[in-house]
């Protein structure tokens, strides 16, 4: 199975469009990531390869996801196709007064909304922010094996939903403590990855361990420091984590860590056509 990904990487040279297609194949033994840059030549394509990571190719595909609000890579055993994260027609009752809703496009707006037939209030659906840490320690990164669905038994960076009342960095540190029992110091933001179809934005921070005392929390089966050439790309839980780790390894290869911003595209179209 394949998954189309668009990444926008910010560098001192300007905004760079990085296009990636994640191809998960059983027989792949190498990895290829292609970049399409608009800062110099909009048609210039550069490629790097490394082994033993998975192959990334440009081919037509359909997107898939396990559950609305989740972001699994294709190998996840819980895969089903989804059309969108927020189906407004599922909102049957008003969250304020409990009255029944109608589904219309309000005056001056463009999207279908759930509108209360009693108090006339409109229910707006907003994306959720997922925050987490990419923790590096002596050439290794800390990963957690999930003990919950979706993607039970697969590996991920410690991350979760931001809570009201905390900053993104505070939420990332809290999630790291809850999932990996690790106390960390946030160094800098590393990546923001938007996933519009499922209504999520990932904000991943670079962080370092304050000590080596870490252990799996209730949501994790195991926590391990992986050498960079031993990262289990074949069994990562989410495409966002797959992209983040690939961006990190590419930055290390270039000798410069930078901030990345982009969009993971889970829509049902041929990726190669998106650039025509």
Image (spheres, rainbow, N blue to C red):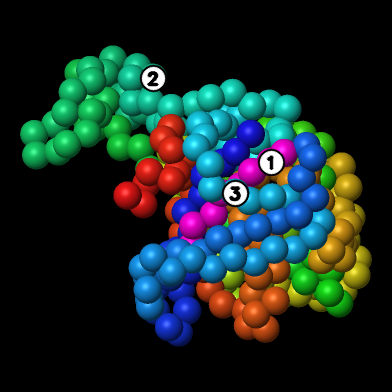
Which is nearer the N-term, disc 3 or disc 2?
3
Q: Mark 1 or mark 2, which has the lower sequence index? A: 1
Range drawn in magenta: 18-25
Q: Residues within 10 Å of mark 3 (few under 14, many from 20)?
A: some
Q: Is residue 134 left or right of residue 130?
A: right
Residue 65 spot, x, y in % from top left = 57, 32
Name which residue lies at 50% across and 31% down: 62
Q: Nearer the viewer, mark 1 or mark 2?
A: 1
Q: Main secondary structure of the magenta part?
A: strand
The nearer-to-camera label among 3 and 2 is 3
Residue 135 drawn at (x, y percent): 75, 67
Would you place residue 139 above or below residue 243 in this image? below
Please state which of residues 18 and 150 is positioned toward the viewer in this rendering: 18
Q: The N terminus is located in which quarter?
A: top right
Q: Is residue 84 visible?
A: yes
Query: Which label was assigned to residue 90?
Result: 2
Q: Provide the residue designation for mark 3.
A: 57
Tag 1 residue: 24
Q: Which image quadrant for residue 177?
A: bottom right
């Amino acid at each position: 199975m394949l998954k189309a990904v668009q990444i926008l990487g910010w560098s001192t040279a300007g905004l760079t469009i990085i296009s990636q297609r994640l191809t998960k194949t059983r027989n792949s033994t190498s990895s290829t990531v292609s970049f399409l840059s608009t800062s110099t030549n909009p048609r210039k394509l550069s490629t790097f390869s490394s082994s033993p990571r998975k192959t990334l190719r440009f081919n037509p595909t359909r997107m898939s996801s396990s559950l609305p609000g989740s972001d699994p890579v294709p190998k996840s055993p819980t895969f089903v196709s989804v059309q969108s994260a927020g189906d407004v027609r599922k909102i049957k009752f008003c969250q304020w007064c409990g009255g029944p809703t109608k589904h219309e496009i309000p005056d001056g707006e463009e999207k279908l909304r759930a509108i209360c037939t009693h108090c006339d209030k409109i229910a707006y659906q907003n994306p959720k922010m997922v925050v987490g840490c990419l923790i590096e320690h002596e050439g290794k990164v800390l990963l957690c094996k999930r003990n919950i669905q979706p993607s039970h038994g697969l590996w991920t960076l410690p991350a979760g939903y931001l809570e009201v009342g905390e900053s993104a960095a505070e939420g990332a540190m809290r999630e790291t403590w809850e999932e990996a029992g690790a106390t960390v110091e946030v160094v800098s933001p590393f990546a923001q990855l938007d996933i519009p179809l499922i209504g999520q934005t990932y904000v991943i921070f670079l962080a370092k361990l304050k000590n080596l005392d870490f252990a799996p929390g209730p949501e994790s089966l195991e926590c391990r420091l992986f050498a960079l050439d031993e990262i289990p790309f074949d069994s990562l839980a989410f495409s966002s984590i797959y992209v983040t780790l690939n961006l990190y390894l590419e930055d290390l290869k270039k000798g410069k860590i930078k901030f990345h911003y982009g969009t993971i595209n889970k829509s049902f179209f041929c990726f190669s056509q998106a650039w025509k």
